[in-house]
Image (cartoon, rainbow, N blue to C red):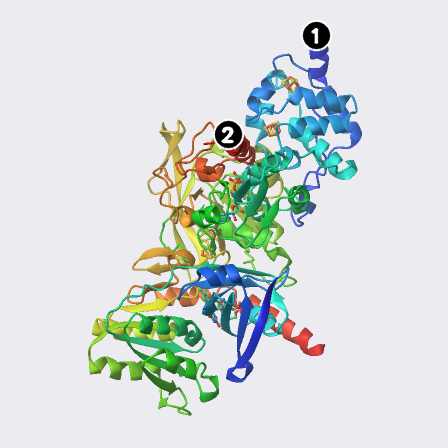
Amino acid sequence: MFTIVRREEMAQGTVILNEIEAPLIARKAKPGQFVILKAGEDGERIPLTMAETDPDKGTITIIYMVVGKSTAIFRDLAVGDGYQDVIGPLGKPTHLEKVGKVICVGGGTGVAVLHPITRAMKDVGNEVVCIIGARTKDLLILEDQMRGASHDLRLCTDDGSYGHHGFVTEVMKEVLDEGGVKQVVAIGPVPMMKAVSTITKEYQVPTLVSLNPIMVDGTGMCGGCRVSVGGETKFACVDGPEFDGHQVDFDELNLRLRAYLADEKKCHEDYCTIRDAR
Amino acid sequence: MAEKAAKQTKNPRVPMPEQEPRIRARNFLEVPTGYTAKMAQDEAARCLQCKKPGCVDGCPVSVDIPGFIDLMAQGDMTGAIRNLWGKNALPAVCGRVCPQEIQCEGKCILGKKGEPVAIGNLERYCADYERQYGTGELPPKQPATGKRVAVIGSGPSGLTVAGDLIVKGHDVTIYEAFHKPGGVLIYGIPEFRLPKEIVAQEVNFLERLGVRVECNAVVGRTVSLDELFAEGYDAIYIGVGAGLPRFMNIEGENLVGILSANEYLTRANLMKAYKFPDVDTPIPMGKNVVVLGAGNVAMDAARTAMRLGAESVKIVYRRSREEMPARKAEIHHAEEEGIEMFLLTNPTRYLGNDEGRLTGMECLRMELGEPDDSGRRRPVAIDGSEFQLECDLCIVAVGSGANPLLTSETPDMKLNRWGYIDADEKNGKTTKKGVWAGGDIVTGAATVILAMGAGRLAADSMHDYLTLGW
Ligand SMILES: Cc1cc2nc3c(=O)[nH]c(=O)nc-3n(C[C@H](O)[C@H](O)[C@H](O)COP(=O)(O)OP(=O)(O)OC[C@H]3O[C@@H](n4cnc5c(N)ncnc54)[C@H](O)[C@@H]3O)c2cc1C
Ligand SMILES: Cc1cc2nc3c(=O)[nH]c(=O)nc-3n(C[C@H](O)[C@H](O)[C@H](O)COP(=O)(O)OP(=O)(O)OC[C@H]3O[C@@H](n4cnc5c(N)ncnc54)[C@H](O)[C@@H]3O)c2cc1C
Ligand code: SF4
Ligand code: SF4
Ligand code: FES
């Protein structure tokens, strides 16, 4: 068992942080890599990015949004409980290079995934402008951490309750117009990554996105995570999860993410009904 | 002798009882239910005890077939299972899944005029008998050598190496990427053909012997081969299988509803998705299902889809019936269960709706032309023969390749041009010192018994290395 040693709730309990004992993984993990977790015997294998790792303590930290049955089961785990299985580190690490000025754009729980990458981008000597957004103020996560990981943090909310009133893409355009931007990293909901990539293509700024297709093994064995990049089929778990945003077929990814929507909605509702009845 | 032979040839082969096709096509229980003691005795009595047994030549690991059958016939079940174990560590598995018709039974003398001895069924009976009534006594272990061995992958070849080396006194740890050990025996071959309980017992047997099993360890990611050596391992065996799905590379392949057989079977078997929503992993429930390919994998996928409630299941294969690579018994079982065969048919593109979901596929009819490199007649398309098949789920089972996850992290180990590991046929040695390999990652997708045979050869060579040197 992989024991949970720290647990926090964010964004009104819709986002959960777990710090988990996993010494082998903590020792090897690099920014951009993910793990697959399974809560119990009959659990689903769920991919989540490592938001932080502590090789000395032997722990990894995940931050996830509760969206369905499996993440709801994860939410119900307390400190001292654990995951039956944690597999990783999986995926290719982020390609880190000193290029100059970099924009890191995050939306929703994408911010959790973005955090270690932002810090690493800064650590290799880049000037990092970070833009993060959420629907509303209460759903904005990791503000302090992101401020520490970047040189300049800009905030946005869709409803204007905090920071810029509007989308991250609007703020990004302003920064791009200031000039000198050499690289953009965008992580968040598929429509956000698509919008960012469309804009940066006009500006001809290389853009990295982190894709989140449905996965099973995470080792290139099943092909369930396939995505189209530049007209070629790639397996996100081994060839990614980061790809050139200008080449990704986001519309296909969006459709593929909906493959089990009806089934999962039903089983999540059933789980909540049973849980609330207890 | 001639008289005896004539008499025994006349005794018909004892068929193994099976669940009724109509009933079993909707459940996941094992299809053949096993011999009774009487049936096993009768079948064992058919063997002529040949002096030069063809059957043994047909078995890739040379199981002493007349030997174990004779012991059975005398009622010495303990002797029979010991005899089997001498060559084959997993008789309960091989009795069920070996392609006997082209191996042992294909060479049985009785097959020349009538039906061969049911060697697989007898092997299964012995192993099942041992599991039910055996003492479970562990084989003796040699004194500890102090040498440490890491086995990567817990499929049949890795399990064989672990079992062989632990009794020779070495300290053995298996590293497995999945959360459960067993390889294809657990995630690929379905419950109705190989109950998972059998595989779990085999692994448990190794654990009782002292083998450590580390699951969730993706070698190449969690830990590298060189790190294992640095941790103090003296030798490493790689048996990671051929875990890379092949697709058709035709238009529309990424529509929702098209899965590799690896994904479909992993969801069904390893994740037990056939119990969804009692378990958390979903699996697409197809109404009209098409399976591409005609090997064991394709049959398993098709029969699983039928059990999950499909209205129709079709096998689409571009060659003819003679070329179908699956075990004859499974093709027969599949047809009995109502699976339709669309032979000499090749899909050319998938059709979808505006939600990106599969709705059908376009196919071409084929005819057999000149033989190709493999000696099989090459299928050629018949002009203008396009037609459409309606389907909402397509499972692609057209073969697999070498997964590069581990090998790409091990640049000092030579691969062949298809990405499989280059290992010495005689002993499994790779070009990296202290590292052996065998099974599907060396040969390409093959069979359980070949993977085990390669494991045994490598284990012998590893033992020599650990006691004598490279
Ligand atoms: C490499 C990778 C890294 C990820 N990192 C994070 C992370 O750090 N934090 C985080 O909150 N989430 C992350 N995700 C997404 C996370 O895996 C899904 O949210 C989770 O699988 C949903 O499981 P569920 O059973 O709770 O919901 P489900 O009931 O399975 O699904 C609920 C909703 O989520 C959608 N969904 C299903 N699977 C996925 C998926 N793999 N990705 C996105 N949406 C999905 C469904 O379409 C549905 O709308 C990552 C995904 C990948 C592939
Ligand atoms: C659906 C299906 C049906 C089949 N039916 C038959 C049949 O009826 N008869 C027959 O004889 N053969 C059959 N086969 C073929 C047979 O199962 C294989 O040839 C055999 O299992 C190969 O054994 P192996 O030990 O080489 O590898 P596998 O059984 O593939 O096991 C390899 C193991 O290594 C693990 N692994 C992979 N990469 C890593 C890594 N980097 N680190 C750690 N672990 C790793 C995998 O998770 C897996 O558990 C079938 C195959 C399939 C897929
Ligand atoms: S191991 Fe397979 S081929 Fe050999 S005798 Fe047994 S069933 Fe036949
Ligand atoms: S060839 Fe057939 S009859 Fe002869 S020993 Fe083998 S199984 Fe028995
Ligand atoms: S998750 Fe199976 S291949 Fe990527």
Disc with the residue nearer the chain's start (1 vs 2): 1
Local packing at callout 2 (Cα closer than 10 Å; few below 14, some 14-19, many 20+) is few
Q: Position of residue A88 (x, y in %)?
A: 48, 59
Q: Residue furthest bottom?
A: A161
- The residue positioned 33% from the left and 72% from the top of the image is A123
Label 2 within 8 A of ligand 2 by Cβ: no
Q: Quadrant of residue B132?
A: top right
In 3D space, how far apart are the residues under numbered discs 1 and 2 (Cα atoms)?
A: 48 Å
- Residue B444 visible at all: no
On the image, numbered disc 2 is attached to which residue?
A: B468
Q: Position of residue B70 (x, y in %)?
A: 72, 20
Q: Chain of mark 2?
A: B
Q: Indicate whether B401 appears above or below A155.
A: above
Asked which quadrant contains residue B412, the reply is top left
| Label annotation for residue B1 | 1
Whether residue B155 can be seen here = yes
Frontmost residue, A192 versus B417: B417
The quadrant of the rendering that contains the C terminus of chain A is bottom right
Discs 1, 2 touching: Cβ within 8 Å: no
Q: Is residue A20 left or right of residue B85?
A: left
| SS at badge 1 | loop
Q: Nearer the viewer, residue A169 or B113?
A: A169
Q: Residue A231: x percent and y percent?
A: 30, 58
Which of the image's four quarters has the N terminus of chain A? bottom right
Chain to which the residue tagged by mark 1 belongs:
B
Of discs 1 and 2, which sits in the foreground? 2
* The residue carrying mark 1 has its beta carbon less than 8 Å from ligand 4: no
Q: Do badges 1 and 2 share one subunit?
A: yes
